[in-house]
Image: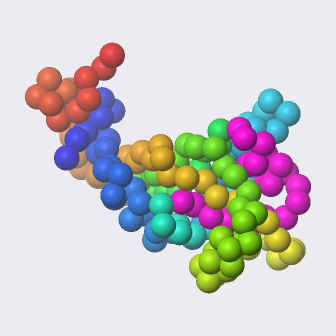
Amino acid sequence: MHVDRNGLEVLEREECLRLLAGATIGRLGITIGALPVVLPVNFRLVGERIVFRTAVGTKLDGATRNAVVAFEIDDIEPFAHAGWSVIVTDVAHEVTDPAELAALARANIPRWAPTRADHIVEVPTTMVSGRRLVPGRPFDPLAMGRGLAPQPH
């Protein structure tokens, strides 16, 4: 187990993908008019890519302009001061290949809004990272020198 310089457990890729596979609601960070926007989406992890439905508009436009997006899920328990967060950063693409769309239809990807959402967007999980806050774990700044946490640059 690795602990970062803030005392958070660094999650391995496999654990991040497991957490993504168990979630159904995430947040998509996109840029609209040079301003950051974060929007909720229902999604599925299909293979190693995040897939969600959307209609024509802000989400589709912002997510498919060959711009980098951020996708985040988390589970936080504020009273116990515990939880985890997973972030994926990559370039989103609209899925347009008919065979791929047919295969994704079997994934039963839900819609966030009750309106018609005819477009499928995918976000590869090439760059995925996660952190876990464990209650009661004391922060040990000396752990950084023992290889338990990444060294600051």
Q: Is residue 123 left or right of residue 20?
A: right
Q: Quadrant of residue 18?
A: bottom left
Q: Nearer the viewer, residue 20 or 143?
A: 20
Q: Quadrant of the C terminus?
A: top left
- Is residue 8 left or right of 63 when viewed as pictured? left
How many marks the image carries: the answer is: 0
Q: Nearer the viewer, residue 83 or 12?
A: 12
Residue at the limit of the structure toward the top, as seen here? 153
Work out whether 50 lies above or below 146: below
Q: Position of residue 82 (x, y in %)?
A: 37, 54
Q: Residue at x 74, y 49 (%)?
A: 63
70 up-or-down from 100: above or below: above
Where 28 sits versus 22, above or below? above
- Residue 60 pos. (x, y %): 80, 54
Residue at left 68%, top 78%?
102
Percent position (x, y) of residue 58? 85, 51
Residue 2 drawn in magenta = no
Residue at the location (15% across, 30% down)?
Answer: 147
Residue interval drawn in magenta:
49-67
Residue drawn where x is 33% and y is 33% of the image:
6
Residue 98 is at least partly visible in this image = yes
Visual colour scheme: rainbow
Residue 55 is one of the magenta-drawn residues: yes
Q: Residue furthest left?
A: 146
Horizontal side of 151 relative to 63 (left or right) equals left
Q: Position of residue 29 (x, y in %)?
A: 67, 45
| Nearest the eye: 100 or 92 | 100
The answer, for residue 83, to whether it is visible in the render is no
